[in-house]
Image: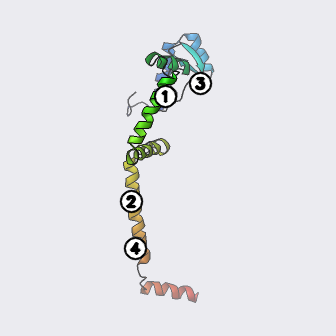
């Protein structure tokens, strides 16, 4: 669904459940509702499976891929038949990775790593981090300038101190 629609989260969930109900047999849907979220429908195998059978996917509404792990493996093998188990292919892929890392050492690799880390762990981009650092640096300089400024004794300061001393 598009973001910014007029539906509340509860309404969106109801819509998803309605679509799910239409896509599975009535007995399976009743079993799904009774499981309290412990089961999930796999459209590829047309069965309910435990949630542990599904890989995580932060972009989906329930945090899981729509197909189970076994179905994803079958689909991957369809696109890349036998490549994952082929030691020669794996060695070639590792060699390409080593060559790329060697060619892109330094700024490009560390920048890509930094961007990935920021996005994954903090949910921010490099531009946001740079802006925050700039503001913090300005704030630090301002605080340093204020603390180094000579204290000017005003009549108010001296009046407050003398009243406090007298009491």
Q: Eyeballing the image, is 127 above or below 142?
A: above
* Residue 24 x, y percent position in the rendering: 52, 12
Query: On the rendered structure, is 45 left or right of 142?
Result: right
| Residue 59 in view here | no
* Residue 68 x, y percent position in the rendering: 54, 20
Q: Nearer the viewer, mark 1 or mark 2?
A: 1
Verify CB contact (< 8 Å) between mark 4 and mark 3: no
Disc on the earlier residue, 1 or 3 = 3
137 or 7: which is nearer to us?
137
* Residue 63 x, y percent position in the rendering: 52, 30
The quadrant of the image that shows the N terminus is: top left
User: Which corner quadrant of the image does residue 101 belong to?
Assistant: top left
What distance separates the C-alpha of mark 1 from that of mark 2? 47 Å
Q: Nearer the viewer, mark 4 or mark 1?
A: 1
Q: Which residue is mark 1?
A: 91
Could you tell me which secondary element the residue under label 4 belongs to?
helix
Verify CB contact (< 8 Å) between mark 2 and mark 3: no
User: Within 10 angstroms of label 1, few (less than 14), some, or many (20 or more) residues?
Assistant: few
What distance separates the C-alpha of mark 4 from that of mark 1? 58 Å
């Amino acid at each position: 669904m598009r973001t910014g629609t007029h539906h509340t989260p509860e309404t969106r969930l109801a819509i998803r459940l309605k679509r799910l109900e239409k896509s599975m047999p009535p007995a399976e849907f009743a079993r799904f509702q009774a499981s309290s979220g412990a089961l999930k429908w796999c459209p590829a195998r047309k069965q309910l499976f435990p949630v542990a059978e599904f890989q995580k996917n932060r972009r989906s509404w329930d945090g899981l891929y729509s197909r189970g792990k076994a179905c994803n493996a079958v689909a991957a093998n369809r696109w890349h038949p036998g490549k994952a188990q082929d030691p020669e292919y794996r060695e070639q892929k590792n060699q390409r990775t080593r060559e790329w890392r060697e060619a892109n050492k330094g700024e490009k690799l560390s920048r890509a790593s930094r961007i990935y880390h920021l996005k994954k762990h903090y949910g921010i981009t490099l531009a946001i981090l740079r802006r925050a650092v700039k503001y913090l640096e300005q704030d630090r300089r301002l605080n340093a300038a204020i603390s180094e400024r000579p204290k000017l004794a005003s009549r108010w300061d001296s009046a407050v101190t003398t009243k406090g001393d007298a009491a």
